[in-house]
Image (spheres, rainbow, N blue to C red):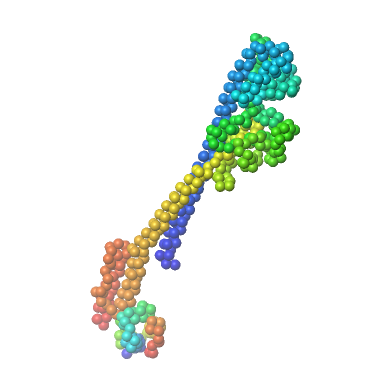
Amino acid sequence: MSIRAKVIIGVTLVFTVGAAVVLALLQWQYNQDVDYVGNQAISNAQQTFNNLERSDTKMLTSNLLSLMVDREILDLYEAGNRQKLYDRVAPLFKQLTDEANITHWYFIRTEPDSRVFLRVHKPATFDDKIKRKTYLKSVKTKGFASGLEMGKTAVALRTVHPYYDGDKLVGYMELGEEIDHFFAAMKAQTGDDYGVLLSKGALDRKAWADLMKEKGKPDPWDVRKDYVLADSTNPEFADEISYSKDAESIPDEGILLGVFPEGGRTEIRGLFPIKDLTGAKVGAVFVIHDITFVASQIRATQLRVVAAVVGTLVLVLLLLLFGLNSLVFRRLSSMTSNMEDVSTRIAGGDYSMGAMPQPKLNDEIGRFEKFFYDFMGLISKTLEQLVGRK
Amino acid sequence: MGRLYDAVVAIDRVIESRGLDAFKVKGQISMKAGIFLAIIFPDTPDDEQKLQAVKQAAEEVLGQGINV
């Protein structure tokens, strides 16, 4: 194989490897960028969720404080007249629901009884014993107890406080809200879509089925292995919302599931856990973040960089080969031809070196040419003298 | 005259008859044979090995054998 061919192959290989390295780096950078964007989306969603939980907890607390100091309500409760109490508080409850999304209001008897005296949101159901963690915590601390709590069919944010008449403990009052309105608010703020996955283990199967029947919706219980999709901001994405591991395995800071092309869109999916007030993970919020525009921008930039790099490499390769050809290979070829001719002619008895071409350039090849011609001139003269003597 | 010199004369005859470049052809034969033809004279002692080398080189370069 000629030196020229070896150089061409070698340089082409090096440049190809270089281009491949650049491409790999670009892809790595793209993955890093996407991971960053994805993790940011999950973090933002989690922060927004936590902020909503905090602000709604304050709202529930302040409403609870206002209700607990209402004398008329207290008197009706202490009188034990459930219907009159309901008649008094029902309009208030409607207002709380309409204005503040409050969906639960309980009057609970003192411990150890702990039975529900009145569920304002469901007056037909009463006298069942409350064993919920928020209630038990309030009983223990004799103060506010707030947090997310899994009910039979949903997660609700609850606030409970002891109910006093002066210094006398007469019961407990609880306000609560389902958190489904959180996700519409989150979507309005972030632009992302969300789904709420609740762990099946934390739900009541029969209660769930009854709820679906009551709402006239198909029961999604068997669609997923460990979770039920309780809510989503866009029903079109329901099929995309799933997770194969249990809620306890989800890291506190959430997890990025990856980048998914989906019908012309590119989206990042991830989720973060929903924790109740004890810290147990009862489900997850699934995050769908659209990066179609960002991804296309990054890809366009990548293509431009690749085109520039490849174009530059090709140009450099061509210039290098042109330079090598002009300065080295062509001259080597000419030099070799001249040397062969000179040597042959001297061997054939032509001792005249007068017409030898002198090298044009004083570089490495030029200096070797000059040396060769000088040496052959010496050989030629010596031979001429030897032959002449004979 | 030696047979080596005869070989050179035969080579010259072929070169002349074909109008070839004498220096170039004899140089090619010299380099193939490993012997300068220019220093083969009538009294150059014969050497069978050198003679065969010249004859073979001449055949390769001229494309025809020489009779010596």
Residue A288 visible within the image: yes
Measuring from the top left, give residue A216's x and y in whole percent: 71, 35
Residue A58 vs A264, above or below: the answer is above
Residue nearest the viewer, comparing B34 with A349: A349
Measuring from the top left, give residue B26's x and y in whole percent: 33, 81
Give the left or right position of residue A255, taking residue B24 as reference: right
Quadrant of the image occupied by residue A63: top right
* Residue drawn at x 74%, y 32% as measured from the top left: A210
* Residue drawn at x 45%, y 52% as measured from the top left: A306
* Residue drawn at x 25%, y 76% as measured from the top left: A352
Residue nearest the viewer, comparing A8 with A82: A82
Give the left or right position of residue A168, taking residue A49 as reference: right
Quadrant of the image occupied by residue A351: bottom left
- What is the quadrant of the C terminus of chain A in the image? bottom left
Quadrant of the image occupied by residue A215: top right
Measuring from the top left, give residue A107's x and y in whole percent: 69, 18
Residue A12 vs A199, above or below: the answer is below
- What is the quadrant of the N terminus of chain A in the image? bottom left
* Residue drawn at x 62%, y 41% as measured from the top left: A236
Residue A56 vs A38, above or below: the answer is above
Q: How many labels does the image show?
A: 0
Give the left or right position of residue A212, taking residue A344 as reference: right
Residue A279 vs A337, above or below: the answer is above
Residue A277 visible within the image: no
Measuring from the top left, give residue B11's x and y in whole percent: 34, 86
Residue nearest the viewer, comparing A343 with A188: A188
